Image: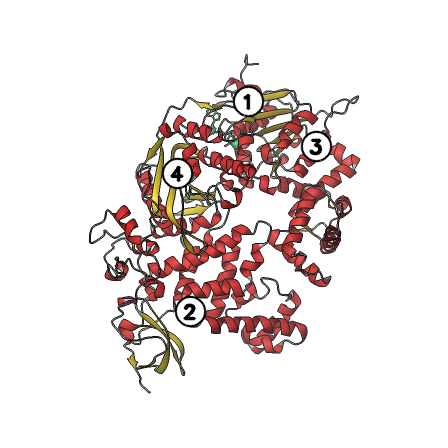
C-alpha cells in the first residue's frame, strides 16, 4: 500500500492513510475531536478521484453546514484538477433540494416549488387553522407545527400515524389539511424536503437504481448527528446487502464522534452509528486517536470533562503538540465586565500578532452575544456573528424595533408593513395591497389610509392601528424599559414565539432587548434608571454619574445627535435615541466581507471549526449547563458534550469565563460557577482570578470592595459597566431643579405644558413635557430652564 505513496497521503498517520485508502466498501471512522476525520474524508474523495476509482459524478458527500461544503470543494479543487461541480457535496437539505429540482414531476411538485422556512411554516399553519375553525386553545399552532415536523422526521405521513385518542386524530386531520394546502400552493417545508425525496427514492425503482449505480461513494461527515429520516434516506442510495443478492456495489463512508452528538433535541440519533454497523454489515471500523488540533493542556481538559459522561463508545485522544499554555479561567463581576475583559484580552492577542479571524467567542445561548457585541462595537473591533445574525439584525428584534418605531412615528410605512400582520392577525396580502392603493391615491401613509379600506380587511387593519394608538398612549411617561416590556407583551411577540418549536431562542433575544435598553440608558446617562448609582450603607449616592462628570476617559462617546438643542433644550426621547443606537449598531460596524474579524458564534455553530484562541463564556449554572437540560441525565450529558465540542475548538489558547451577575430575562441574576469547572483537571488550569471566587454578595458595596479594591473613591470602570452593577432602587437624585412629574411648567418657546416624567440626574436630567400646542417633547433641564407655573 505504501510502496508508492501518493502525495495526497504524505503527512497522514498510518490510521488516517488506512482510512483514506480503504477498499470501496462500507466503513465507519469513529474518532474524537481534531483527529482529522474531516481531513480524512476530504482526502479520501481526492484519492478516489486521483486513482481513477470514481469520476466526480460518482461522489456524494454530506457535510454539516453549507460553509463546510464550500470549504471541501475549495480544498478538492486545490488538490486536484477536477470539475468539482459534478460532485454532489452539500448539506442534507441542500442535496434534497437538488434532488427534487431534478425530479419535480415524479415528486408531484411544480418546477418552481418554494421552500418554507420555520417562520413561513408557522404562518401557513395558522392560516389553515383559521380557515378550518381549529380551536387554537386546544391546538396551539406552534404545537401543531411541532407535531407535523416530528411526524415528518419519523417518516410518517398522516395515514402512518398511530391514532390512539381523539386529540391525535384531530392533529392528524390538520396535518392532512396542511399537506393539501402546501401541495396546492406549491411549497415545501424543511422536513418535507427530506421526506419527499426519500419517498421518491423508495417508490421509484428506476430512479433509485439510477442513483445507486451513479453514486459509487457516499461520504457523510458528523454522522453522530443524523436523525432517523436522514439515515433512512442514505439507505435508499445504498441498500444494505440483502442476503442471496450481490451487494449493490457502492460504499458508504461515515465519520463521526459520539462525544460530539449535540442535536438530540432535534431528533438526532447516536444509535444510527450502531445501526449502520449492523445493517450495512460494516467490516471496516477505524479509530483515530491522534489529535492534531490542540495542545495537551486543552486536550486533557476535554478528555477529563467528557469522562464524566457514562454513555460513551469510548476512545482516547493524545497529542504530540506539547503541553502548550494552561487553560485560562476568569471570573468577572458581571456579564458586562466579562465582555470588557475579553475585548481587552483580544487587543493583547492582536498586538501579539494573532489575526482576528483566529479568535472565537463561543456562547451557549444566542442572546449572550448582545453584551459582547456592544463591547466589541465600542472598542471598534470588527466582528462577525457566525451561523446567525448579529443581535439587532435578528428577525424578532427587528419586529420589536418596528413596533417601537411606530410608537414614535406611525407613518413609518416600512415598519408598518413589517408588523401589520406579525404576529399574524388575519390581514392578508390582498388587504395590504388594497391599503397601499388607498395610500398611493391619497398620498398619505399606510397608517392614515386605513379609513379608506372597507369591509373585513378594513376592520382588521383598523384594529391594528388602534392597538398601536393604545400602546402609544399607554407608554407616554414610561421609562424605556417599561415601554419595551409593554410592547413585547401587547404586540403578542413574546407569546407568539414562546411555544414555537425552537422559539425559545427568540424569546431570550426579545428579553435581551430589555437589557440592551437598560444598558443603553445607563451608558448614555438617560432615564430614571441612570440614577441607580452606587450608594453607601445609608443609601446616599457615592458619586455622580461618571459619564456626566467626564471622569472616565474610556466611556463611550455620546452620539452627537443626542445633544440637546442649544436654544430650546429639546432633546431626543430615550426611545428615539435607543432606536438610533440600534440602527447604527446593526449597520456600520458589520465587518466587511473579507475583512479580518473576530468570530462570534454559539457552541452549536462551532462544530467542526477550529481557532488559535477561543473564549468560552458564561460558564454558570443555569446558562451552561442550560437550565432546561439540568433536570435529567440525558440533558446533562448533552450539555457536557456541548462543552466538549467547545473546548476542542481551541488550538493554542483557551479561555473559560464566568460572571457573578448577569442580566437574564431583564433581571440581574447572581450565578453560581458552572459545575463543569469541577470536572476539569486542576493541573491544566490557570486561575486569573482567585479560584475560591468572591462569595455571591448581595449588596453592591460588598462587590465593589471585592472588585475595585475598596477605598473611599473607587476607581471607576466605564460608565455603562458601573451602572450595570448598581442595584435598584435608587435614592431620589439631586437634579438641581425642582421640576417634578405632574407639574405645570412654562417654556419660553413651547409655552405652558404638563410634566409627564422626569429622568436622569445632574447634567443629564431630562423632562418629558406635554405642550398642548407643540405635543410631547423631551427637554434637557440643564438647557431648557423650565419654570413652574402655579394655577
Ligand atoms: P472535529 O471532530 O472537530 O470535526 P476532525 O476530526 O474533523 O475534528 P479535522 O478538522 O479534520 O479533525 O482536523 C483537525 C486539524 O488537524 C486540522 O487543522 C487538520 O488539518 C489537522 N490534521 C489532521 N490530520 C493531520 C496530520 N496527519 N498531520 C497534521 N495535521 C493534521
Ligand atoms: Mg470535522
Residue 754 sits above or below residue 702 on the image:
below
In this view, the residue farthest toward the front is 538
Q: Secondary structure at mark 4?
A: strand
Which numbered disc, 2 or 4, marks the residue that appears first in the sequence? 2
Question: Residue at label 1?
Answer: 287
Q: Residue at image x 59%, y 53%?
A: 500
335 or 574: nearer the viewer: 335
Which label was assigned to residue 212?
A: none
From the viewer's perspective, is the residue at label 2 or at label 1 nearer? 2
- Which residue is nearer to you in this view: 543 or 590? 543
Q: On the image, numbered disc 4 is attached to which residue?
A: 656
Quadrant into which the N terminus falls: top right
Q: Position of residue 378 (x, y in %)?
A: 34, 52
Residue 206 lies left or right of residue 455; in this view the side is right
Which residue, as the protein is rendered here, is positioned at the far top?
3
Please tell me whether mark 1 sits on a helix, a strand or a loop.
strand
Q: Residues within 10 Å of mark 1 (few under 14, many from 20)?
A: some
Q: Position of residue 194 (x, y in %)?
A: 68, 42
Which label's residue is closer to the chain start, 4 or 3?
Answer: 3
Measure the C-alpha gap from mark 2 to mark 4.
39 Å
The quadrant the C terminus occupies is bottom left
* The label number, if any, that marks residue 235 in the structure image: 3
Residue mark closest to the camera, 3 vs 2: 2
Residue 475 appears in the picture as rendered: yes
- Disc 3 vs disc 1: Cβ atoms closer than 8 Å? no
The disc, 2 or 1, on the residue closer to the chain's N-terminal end is 1
Residue at label 2? 478
Amino acid at each position: 500500500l505504501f510502496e508508492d505513496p501518493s502525495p495526497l497521503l504524505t503527512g497522514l498517520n498510518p490510521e488516517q492513510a488506512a482510512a483514506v485508502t480503504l477498499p470501496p466498501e462500507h466503513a465507519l471512522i469513529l474518532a474524537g475531536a481534531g483527529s482529522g476525520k474531516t481531513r480524512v474524508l476530504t482526502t479520501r474523495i481526492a484519492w478516489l478521484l486521483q486513482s481513477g476509482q470514481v469520476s466526480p459524478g460518482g461522489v456524494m458527500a454530506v457535510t454539516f453546514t453549507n460553509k463546510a461544503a464550500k470549504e471541501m470543494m475549495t480544498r478538492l479543487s486545490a488538490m486536484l484538477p477536477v470539475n468539482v461541480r459534478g460532485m454532489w457535496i452539500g448539506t442534507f437539505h441542500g442535496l434534497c433540494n437538488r434532488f427534487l429540482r431534478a425530479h419535480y414531476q415524479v415528486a408531484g411538485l411544480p418546477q418552481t416549488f418554494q421552500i418554507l422556512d420555520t417562520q413561513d411554516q408557522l404562518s401557513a399553519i395558522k392560516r389553515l387553522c383559521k380557515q378550518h375553525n381549529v380551536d387554537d386553545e386546544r391546538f396551539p399552532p406552534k404545537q401543531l407545527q411541532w407535531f407535523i415536523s416530528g411526524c415528518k422526521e419519523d417518516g410518517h405521513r398522516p395515514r402512518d400515524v398511530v391514532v390512539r385518542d381523539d386529540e391525535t386524530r384531530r392533529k392528524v386531520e390538520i396535518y392532512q389539511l396542511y399537506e393539501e394546502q402546501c401541495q396546492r400552493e406549491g411549497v415545501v417545508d424543511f422536513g418535507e424536503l427530506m421526506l419527499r425525496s426519500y419517498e421518491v427514492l423508495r417508490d421509484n425503482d428506476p430512479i433509485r437504481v439510477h442513483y445507486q449505480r451513479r453514486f459509487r461513494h457516499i461520504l457523510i461527515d458528523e454522522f453522530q448527528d443524523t436523525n432517523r429520516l436522514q439515515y433512512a434516506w442514505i439507505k435508499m442510495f445504498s441498500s444494505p446487502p440483502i442476503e442471496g443478492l450481490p451487494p449493490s456495489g457502492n460504499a458508504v463512508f461515515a465519520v463521526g464522534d459520539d462525544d460530539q452528538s449535540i442535536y438530540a433535541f432535534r431528533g438526532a440519533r447516536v444509535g444510527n452509528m450502531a445501526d449502520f454497523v449492523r445493517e450495512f454489515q460494516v467490516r471496516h471500523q477505524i479509530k483515530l486517536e491522534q489529535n492534531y488540533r490542540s495542545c495537551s493542556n486543552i486536550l486533557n481538559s476535554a478528555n477529563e470533562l467528557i469522562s464524566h459522561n457514562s454513555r460513551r463508545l469510548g476512545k482516547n485522544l493524545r497529542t504530540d503538540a506539547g503541553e502548550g499554555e494552561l487553560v485560562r479561567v476568569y471570573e468577572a463581576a458581571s456579564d458586562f465586565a466579562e465582555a470588557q475583559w475579553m475585548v481587552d484580552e483580544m487587543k493583547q492577542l492582536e498586538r501579539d500578532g494573532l489575526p482576528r479571524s483566529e479568535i472565537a467567542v463561543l456562547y451557549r445561548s444566542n442572546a449572550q452575544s448582545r453584551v459582547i457585541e456592544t463591547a466589541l462595537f465600542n472598542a471598534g473591533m470588527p466582528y462577525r456573528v457566525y451561523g446567525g445574525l448579529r443581535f439587532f439584525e435578528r428577525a424578532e428584534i427587528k419586529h420589536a424595533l418596528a413596533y417601537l418605531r411606530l410608537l414614535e412615528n406611525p407613518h413609518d410605512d416600512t415598519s408598518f408593513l413589517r408588523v401589520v400582520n406579525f404576529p399574524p392577525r388575519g390581514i392578508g396580502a390582498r388587504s395590504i395591497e388594497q391599503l397601499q392603493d388607498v395610500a398611493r391615491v391619497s398620498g398619505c401613509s399606510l397608517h392614515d389610509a386605513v379609513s379608506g379600506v372597507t369591509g373585513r380587511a378594513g376592520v382588521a387593519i383598523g384594529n391594528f392601528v388602534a392597538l398601536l394608538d393604545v400602546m402609544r398612549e399607554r407608554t407616554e411617561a414610561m421609562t424605556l424599559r417599561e415601554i419595551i416590556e409593554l410592547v413585547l407583551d401587547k404586540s403578542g411577540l413574546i407569546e407568539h414565539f414562546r411555544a414555537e418549536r425552537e422559539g425559545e431562542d427568540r424569546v431570550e433575544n426579545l428579553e435581551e432587548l430589555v437589557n440592551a435598553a437598560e444598558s443603553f440608558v445607563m451608558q448614555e446617562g438617560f432615564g430614571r434608571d441612570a440614577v441607580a448609582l452606587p450608594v453607601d450603607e445609608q443609601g446616599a449616592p457615592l458619586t455622580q454619574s461618571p459619564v456626566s462628570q467626564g471622569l472616565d476617559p474610556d466611556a463611550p462617546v455620546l452620539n452627537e445627535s443626542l445633544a440637546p438643542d442649544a436654544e430650546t433644550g429639546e432633546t431626543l426621547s430615550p426611545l428615539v435615541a435607543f432606536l438610533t443606537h440600534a440602527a447604527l449598531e446593526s449597520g456600520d460596524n458589520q465587518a466587511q466581507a473579507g475583512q479580518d474579524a473576530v468570530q462570534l458564534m454559539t457552541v452549536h455553530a462551532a462544530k467542526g471549526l477550529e481557532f488559535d484562541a477561543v473564549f468560552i463564556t458564561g460558564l454558570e449554572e443555569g446558562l451552561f449547563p442550560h437550565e432546561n437540560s439540568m433536570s435529567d441525565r440525558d440533558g446533562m450529558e448533552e450539555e457536557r458534550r456541548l462543552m466538549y465540542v467547545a473546548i476542542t475548538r481551541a488550538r493554542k489558547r483557551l479561555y473559560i469565563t464566568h460572571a457573578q451577575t448577569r442580566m437574564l430575562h431583564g433581571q440581574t441574576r447572581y450565578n453560581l460557577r458552572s459545575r463543569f469547572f469541577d470536572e476539569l483537571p486542576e493541573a491544566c488550569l490557570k486561575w486569573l482570578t482567585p479560584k475560591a471566587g468572591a462569595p455571591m454578595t448581595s449588596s453592591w458595596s460588598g462587590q465593589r470592595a471585592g472588585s475595585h479594591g475598596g477605598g473611599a473613591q473607587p476607581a471607576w470602570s466605564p460608565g455603562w459597566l458601573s451602572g450595570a452593577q448598581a442595584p435598584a432602587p435608587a435614592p431620589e437624585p439631586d437634579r438641581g431643579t425642582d421640576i417634578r412629574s405632574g407639574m405645570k411648567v412654562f417654556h419660553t418657546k413651547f409655552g405652558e405644558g404638563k410634566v409627564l416624567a422626569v429622568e436622569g440626574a445632574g447634567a443629564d436630567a431630562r423632562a418629558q413635557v406635554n405642550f398642548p400646542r407643540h405635543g410631547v417633547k423631551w427637554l434637557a433641564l440643564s438647557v431648557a430652564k423650565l419654570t413652574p407655573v402655579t394655577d
